[in-house]
Amino acid sequence: MAELRTEEEQLDAIKRWWKENGTSLIAGVAIAAAGVFGWNAWQNYQENQAQAASMRYQQLINQTAGNELDETDIGEARALVAEIIDSHGKTLYADLARLVDARLAVAQGDQAAARDALEGAIDASSRDYVQGLARLRLARLQVADDDAEAALATLDAGVPEALAAQRADVRGDAYHALGREDEAREAWNEALELAEERDQPLYGVQLKLDNLGFDEATL
């Protein structure tokens, strides 16, 4: 009988505990389940967004692959760039779309829009390599616009070492535009050396040196 009472007391204790805590336990399980479901749903959403961004960017590349783009082609491509940025602004595809947009703007003869696109890529991207590419292209535009001092400042703002040969090349362009031929020669020689060390073909630099006048003393 004592054992029976003990079992009955244990059952009563369990019933009381369940009455006091059962609701909160169920709620906790429901919240945990909702959290797992929400996380999975978020992961699926992110994956779908990444796929959509990739598809739209590939569409952009296909549209701009030809060398003979007319105004209609360029207008449609730039509209697609705007769509990618609006819908997928934090992705790598949006960063790359801004770089494409700058090239399209140059093709239209709109240097200001090209600079805006590149500055937008620098500001919006958290990726050093993308920022470096944008700065290189912006510096080239600045040299072409007779603003070589701004180009040097742009390069000094940060270009990763993976792009060091290209950085030296553009730096040489800026020095040459400023009439600083010795510094231009030094920068272009550095560009060639870095390109050879890293097995990165860099076209046109030797021609610039040849046009400047070959100076063995600087090697």
Image (cartoon, rainbow, N blue to C red):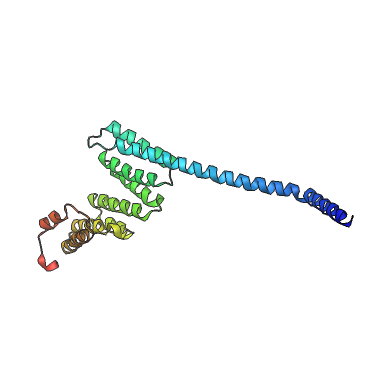
Residue sitting at x 68%, y 49%? 28
Q: Position of residue 137 (x, y in %)?
A: 28, 50
Residue sitting at x 54%, y 44%? 40
Q: Position of residue 176 (x, y in %)?
A: 18, 58
Between 103 and 160, which is closer to the camera in this rendering? Answer: 160
Image quadrant in which you'd find residue 30 = top right
Q: Position of residue 140 (x, y in %)?
A: 25, 51
Residue sitting at x 13%, y 54%? 207
Residue 51 lies, with reference to residue 24, above or below; the image says above
Across the whole image, how many numbered discs are drawn on residues?
0
Image quadrant in which you'd find residue 74 = top left
Relative to 27, 176 lies left or right:
left
Q: Quadrant of the C terminus?
A: bottom left
Q: Position of residue 113 (x, y in %)?
A: 32, 43
Between 2 and 47, which is closer to the camera in this rendering? Answer: 2
Residue at the extreme top:
72
Q: Quadrant of the N terminus?
A: bottom right
Residue at the extreme bottom:
217
